[in-house]
Amino acid sequence: MKAIALFLTLATVLPTLAEERPAYRVIVHPENPIQTVERRFLADAFLKKSSHWPNGEAIRPVDLESESSVRRRFSQDLLKRTTAAVRIYWQQRLFSGRGVPPPELSTDAEVVRYVLKHRGAVGYVAGTADVGGAKVVAVD
Amino acid sequence: MRLSFRAKLIALVAVAALAFLVLAAVGTLYSLRVRDHLERIQALHLPRLELGPKLEGQVEKLSRAFQDASAAKDADMLAQTVDLKQALLDDLAGAGRIVGAAEAAALRGAIEDYHAAATGVTRRLIAGETGEALVDAMEAMQGKHAQVTAILVRGFHVDREGLARDFDTAAQEQINATRIRLLITAICLGVVMLLSYLIGRGVLGSLTRLTEGFGRFGQGRFGEPIPITTRDELGEVSRQANQMAHQLQEAADVRARSDWIKAGFAGLTVELRGELLPKEVASRAVGFIARYLDVPAAALYWSSRAGVLELLGHHALAPGAAGPVPSFRPGEGLVGQAALGEKLMLVEEPPADYLKVRSGLGESAPRAIALLPLLRSDKVMGVLELALFRPWTEEASELMLHVRESLAIALEVARTSAETKALLAETQELNARLATQEEELRTTNEELQTQQEELRQTNEELTQQAEELEVQRRTLQEKNLELDDARRVLEERAKELATVSAYKSQFLTNMSHELRTPLNSMLLLSQLMSENEEKNLTDKQVEFCRTIYSAGKDLLGLINQVLDLAKVESGKQEIKIERVALQGLIERAQRMFQPLARDKGLTFTAELAPGLPEAIQSDHQRVEQIITNLAGNAIKFTERGGVTLRISGMGSQVALAVTDTGPGIAPEHQGRIFAPFEQIEGNTDRRHGGTGLGLTIAKELAMLLGGELRLESTMGKGSTFTCVLPLEVPKRVEKVVAAKVEARPEPVAQRTNGKPAPPLLDDRGGLDAGDPCLLIIEDDRIFGETFAQVIHGQGLKCLLAADGKSGLELARQWKPRGIILDVKLPDMNGFEVMNGLRADPATEKIPVHFVSAVDDSERGLAMGAVGYLTKPATRRDLVRVVEALVPKRTVRTTRILVVEDDVLMGDSVVRQLTSEGLEVRRVAAAAAALEALRDERFGCMILDLSLPDMDGLELLEKIRAQSGPDMPSVVIYTARALSKEEAQRLQSYTDAVVLKEGHSAERLLNEVRLFVRRLKEGLVTRPAPVRRLHPSELHLEGRKVLVVDDDMRTMYALSATLRAKGVEVFSADTGRAALEVLAQHPEVEAVLMDIMMPEMDGYEAMRRIRANELFKKLPIIALTAKAMKGDEEKCLEAGASGYLPKPIDAERLLALLQERLTRTGDA
């Protein structure tokens, strides 16, 4: 009885905890006027199916390294596929000349730096990470 | 057009062939050019189609190898990419000749670069490198890949535009070739058509001209030749045609000249036809020749007998000084000169003053003169001279030479004929004079001859007439002789026939007598025995007796039928025409045959077809006899099924058909079936009794009634006998006694409903007791009253009763002398009435006669009726009924018959007699008198001897023959003085003769009164009626009866019958013996007298018996087998008091005997 009561309690409490502390945050260059971004737009940007922001700036996505848990969570949530699947996707496109993958960076700080460096960049960092001057946008 | 047809046609064909050659050449040229284009396409573009995709596929394969290697992070796999690259480069080695060496080298370099870059990137990936530098390397590698792709797309893919261009060029070439061919074809066609048209036009023109030319030649216009416009074959034809036309023209000219000459010759011949004088011949000949040759003047000189040429005729030459010279000698002048030669002489250009042809307007000299000697038998007979204005023509001279001989002959003939004519005229004059004299002589001679001829003819006619007369006289004599012979032969034949007929008649009579006599005894004895009164016979024996009796009866029937047949065949059968109701026939047949058929297990139906008249006019009795015979026959021969009688119409005839389901009659027997005594042998085996006469009689009767009998039969199925009768018997049957059918007026009483029936018209009121009267019991009022009239006619009174009850009452009250009884009465039937009468002692002895439409005579007679008459009845029948009830002898009447042809005299006599209270009937003629006497009764007759149709004496004889002992008294009332002989003859008939004079009427009346008184005093007592008695009623014991018969069998049978009743019998075998017996035994009370006997017959015997005063009242009953008409009368006349026909019915005999004996006892 106690175990069931505990499970019920966890089931109701955990989602609430996750919402309050997101696993990652999406960041863009501070001059990017966008406030919220649609999940599908974000997915297309990272798979390079969309190439420009609404204001005409070229999109420059940037990934964390493939072993990162944040990246795994991000792929799962936004791209709706595993990191491995994303890698195969890019290998197919790479040698047939149809496109190159976003650069993979090892740390959140490198990602923030890359975002602040390129006006059209977009990236993600862990929820706890310092975004510096980058602009965090809400994913809708 | 100077060319021949052949050349033109060859040119045409050559043009066409050239055109085809050009066409073929152009076609071939363009085909080659198109092929060049297509080859270029094949060489240039097709290899690229293969090479480009192949290289692309290999590049793709190379990139996949890199991908796989990076995915697997395997360096070995990366090494394999070198092999792939090398294979790609090897393939590329041969591509130089396709895309050019420069392109191939560029592609080679690009591939090497891409391979190097890709290898680098892959190595870095395998090494796990990440970051922006790697991404830059990747982008560089992708640039190389894009370069490879660009070179492949640019140089190694199909040049689409080039290909399309080359195809367009080839198609354009094709279109150009087609256009050029079309153009060349059109030009060639144009040229060929133009050539054809030109050639055709030339030929057509030539042909048209030829046709026209031939047309002209056909019409005879040879002068206009066909124009020759060409030198070709048609030109040649035209030329030949023209030549032909020319020849035809020449032939026509020759013929025209010949015709002209012939016409001239013929014209001259026509001109000289007929009997002409030489001068006429000459002038006509000259005129004709001048006209025909159109010469202005001509003259003809003819050598005379003296040899001088004289002018015989001329034309258009004026006489006178300047005229023609009248004569020439031979050798003198031109004429004379011409006469010396034989040839035609032509003098051209004579001198101007030589000869002038003159007309009213002027004169001119001819241009030439022609002199033609006329030859006959090479001898010059004359000269014809012609003056010419025109040149002399060949034809003219030819004509002249032709003509001259005939002209000479004509002139010669004319001259000769003129001379002959002159001689002939002289001879004719002499002849004429001779002829006149001869004519006169001939006339005289002819007159003489004519006279002589006439004389001769007259003589001949006379002779001929005399001969004819002689011949006629002889013929007449011969004919007369022949006629005499024929007449004698006929007379002999007639006599023979009459004798034969008489023999036959006599034979039949005797035969029937001889047959009936033994039969009589047989019947009597067998009947007697069957009664078995002495009870000494066994039942079997009684049965035998009955059989004998019935066989005898059958035999009797046969004899009767034979007699009937004989009568019919000899034409003695009388028929009486009356109304025969068809429904009645049906009913009668049903009544008669239904029981018979039922007994035999058969059905019998009788039916009447619709649409028939109610009745026919025929002899009722005979018709019934036919039906009886046919139906009886049918039932007899039918074992199963039934018999049908059907009466139906057949146009104006009625068919009585009797159909049975019997054995039928074979066709071969059908003819024989109507012969007498025929039955079909074999299958019927004569097992049916009967005579075989029935059908024969039926047939004869049918013929007698003007009809016929037919038979249709099928073996085993049955037969149909059809009797066809006319609706009315034709008048040809001479023996027909037209029965006076009672005209029955419509029953008035029945028609006027509601009115009470008027009282019966009878004599109830004026009837005294004892007056002889008859009672009629009859519900049919009309019939009753008719009957009453008949009775009144018999001088009797009568009573009428309409029903049985009143009839019985009247009978008791008035005791009539006889009763006429109908069977169908409203309250009871006639038989019951009869029983009622017999039951009452007051009426039991009154004789009764049935008269009814119901035929049940057997029952009626069995009840003791005197007779039975079947309606419809004739007046004669009714008279007979009255006679049977009240014989004439028994009742005398005071009715008087006046036979007087003078109306005034008759009326006055009738008035006087009527005023005396007497009943009078007046007739004006003898025939009417006879009829009245036959049908009515009169006490007295007043007779005028002078009657219109018969002498009085003759009438009296007839009356005696007709009436016999019933003849009334006669008073002769006549204005005629009678001779002594007449008076004597009258004595035997009459006792009073009154002459018509002064007071004769008074004397006549006295005579009549005397007669009436005598009559009333001598009234005979009425006789008791004959009736049948029951055997138990017979009281004959001890009576003495004499039986007279020569036949011992009859004698024995009668004696036995009588002795059985206790009668004492005396016998005699002849009339003479009978007289002797009577003399010895005067106590004999009655005599039975046979008629046919040897020595003395029955008539004589009876007369002798009556002659004896002692035996005046002795009852004598005559017995005779001659059941012929008149027998009974003869017997009664001879003195018999009764009569019985043979064979004798024992019961009847005994009853009659009893009655007679009782009566004499009473008297």
Image (spheres, coloured by chain):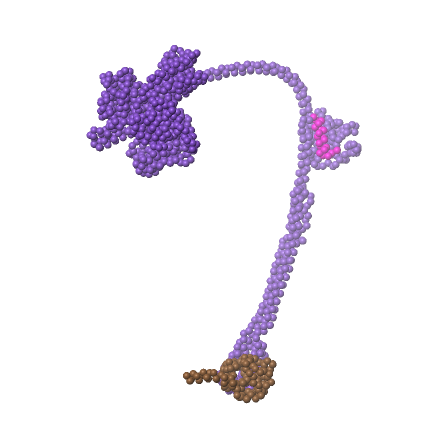
Chain colours: A brown, B purple
User: Relative to B701, is B461 on the left or the right?
Assistant: right
Q: Residue at x 72, y 30 (%)?
A: B286
Seen at 63% across and 61% down, the residue is B183
Q: Is any part of residue A58 visible from this angle? A: no
Asked whether the viewer can see residue B932, the reply is: yes
Q: Position of residue B384 (x, y in %)?
A: 72, 31
Is residue B681 within the magenta segment? no
Q: Which residues are magenta?
A: B277-296
Front residue of this view, candidates B414 and B309? B414
Relative vertical location of residue A136 with respect to residue B693 in this rendering, above or below? below
Residue B815: x and y in percent read 33, 25
Farthest-out residue, left: B536
Number of disc labels: 0
List x then y, in percent, for residue B552. 27, 29
Question: In the displayed structure, would residue B1152 be above or below residue B8?
Answer: above
Q: Is residue B423 left or right of residue B661?
A: right
Q: Which of B363 and B645 lies nearest the eye of the viewer?
A: B645
> What secondary structure is the magenta-colored segment mainly?
helix
For residue B443, side relative to residue B331 (left or right): left
Q: Nearer the viewer, residue B524 or B1030?
A: B1030
Q: Position of residue B572 (x, y in %)?
A: 36, 24
Q: Quadrant of residue B875?
A: top left
Figure quadrant of residue B103: bottom right
Viewed as shown, does residue B740 lie left or right of B345? left
Residue B294 included in the magenta stretch of the image: yes
Which quarter shows the C terminus of chain B?
Answer: top left
Q: Please tell me in which quadrant of the rendered image residue B554 appears.
A: top left
Q: Which residue occupies the foreground of this view, B937 or B775?
A: B775
Residue visible at 34% across and 25% down in the picture: B814
